[in-house]
Image (cartoon, rainbow, N blue to C red):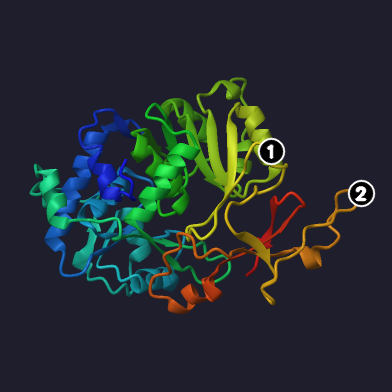
Amino acid sequence: MPTTDPSVADLLVARADDDRTGLCFEEHRWSWRQVVEAGGDRASLLSSWAGDDPLHIGILLGNVPEYIFWLAGAALAGCVVVGINPTRRGQALADDIRRTDCAFIVTDAEGAVLLDGLDLGVPPDRIIRVDLPDFAEGLASHRGHDLRTVVAACAPTPSDLYLLLFTSGTTGTPKAVRCTQGRLASIAVRSAEAYGFDHDDVAYCTMPLFHGNALMVLWGPALVVGATVALARRFSASGFVSDVKRYGATTFTYVGKALAYILATPPSDDDASIPLRRGFGTEASVADQAAFEQRFGCVLTEGYGSSEGGVAISRTPDTPVGSLGRPSGDIAIVDPATGAECPPAVLDAAGRLINGDRCIGEIVNRGGTGRFEGYYADTAATRSRTRDGWYWTGDLAYRDDEGFFYFAGRGG
């Protein structure tokens, strides 16, 4: 691996001759060679559309193979993927598309229903329906390309903007987080090592591909080591175990209450013998983590992070139950009104927090802005996140005497 950050395009080119299975979807299989070839076809198509500025391609699809192929194509062509959130509706959806300067939208029949009648700022002939014959016919002339010639012509670099990832919008209008090829590739390399990915893994992707969780800690690491990505069209608690068995999935990622939904399904006698060995996620309850590990016989790792990348906190074997972990670097819990570091938590004999008014503050990176690359077309929001040269997460926490952090809510 290069000593400097590679680009996502570099990682894809490294898989161009890999005949191991790279992608599974329902009954279909593609080798990594075929995945990269499909990406190359789309890169050639994108280069035929390109002008002076990198194209922004809005993708409004479920977790289907076309999403992976366009992720690859955009990286190889030096274009920008805008992951459109299909849970948005009406004017809010149109606003997301317009303010991220989408030149084209890639979608299917399901997505087209959501777009119908909206003023998107995208001409109708630039809404690409991948489920129609016209798309296959248009793509046909771009097959049989020489991949390295296409990549050389497009010349993608680690500094090229690659993704615009929308925040959840739980505390306001979703913002589009900038992510370059180099940033995603470096996260993928570190995640592959930290979470033990190897080429024999089958990584089951239940989280939506427009979300940083799926890209940064599943698709990216799988690409780094040549593991297999198995797609679920959308998250299904009732279909989780059967999919894990069908694909032979060894690892997966989750966010929020996904574990709780899976645990609510009826147990089976063979739950503990499924191939799943580990999972990584955020914001699951301590009780759900323990119950999931016991029922399915796998190890879960919880971490703290965000699409912005300004702060990351990971658990270690000595992390207390319920803690986010202990951060590295100059990460502190700060009173946002004064900028002073908050004191450690004080607990009574029953373990109840008794100085919450003083010990709870905002998680802040005082060493700088981390890997945060700003919000797209939102200078004010970027400035708010990076005021005084620090990165302010907007998340609240407290710490114990040993320096372990505990989540306490969102500042918004």
Residue 393 point in image, percent of width and height: 57, 64
Residue 271 position (above or below residue 151): above
Residue 46 point in image, percent of width and height: 18, 57
- Residue 104 at least partly seen: yes
Residue at 12% across / 55% down in the picture? Answer: 153
Neighbour tally class for label 2: few under 14, some 14-19, many 20 plus, Cα within 10 Å: few
Compare residues 192 and 169 and report the one nearer the observer: 192
Alpha carbon separation for disc pair 1 and 2: 22 Å
Residue at 42% across / 59% down in the picture? Answer: 86
Residue at 86% across / 49% down in the picture? Answer: 351
Residue 74 point in image, percent of width and height: 25, 54
Compare residues 342 and 144 and report the one nearer the observer: 342
- In the picture, the quarter occupied by the N terminus is top left
Q: Name which residue type carries label 2.
A: Ala
Asked which secondary structure carries label 1, the reply is loop
Left or right of 248: which side holds 288?
Answer: right
Q: Quadrant of residue 121?
A: bottom left
Q: Where is mark 2, residue-wise?
A: 349
Q: Residue furthest bottom?
A: 380
Q: Quadrant of residue 118?
A: bottom left
- In the picture, the quarter occupied by the C terminus is bottom right
- Residue 62 at least partly seen: no
Residue at 77% across / 58% down in the picture? Answer: 344
Q: Name which residue type carries label 1.
A: Asp
Q: Where is mark 1, residue-wise?
A: 318
Asked which secondary structure carries label 2, the reply is loop
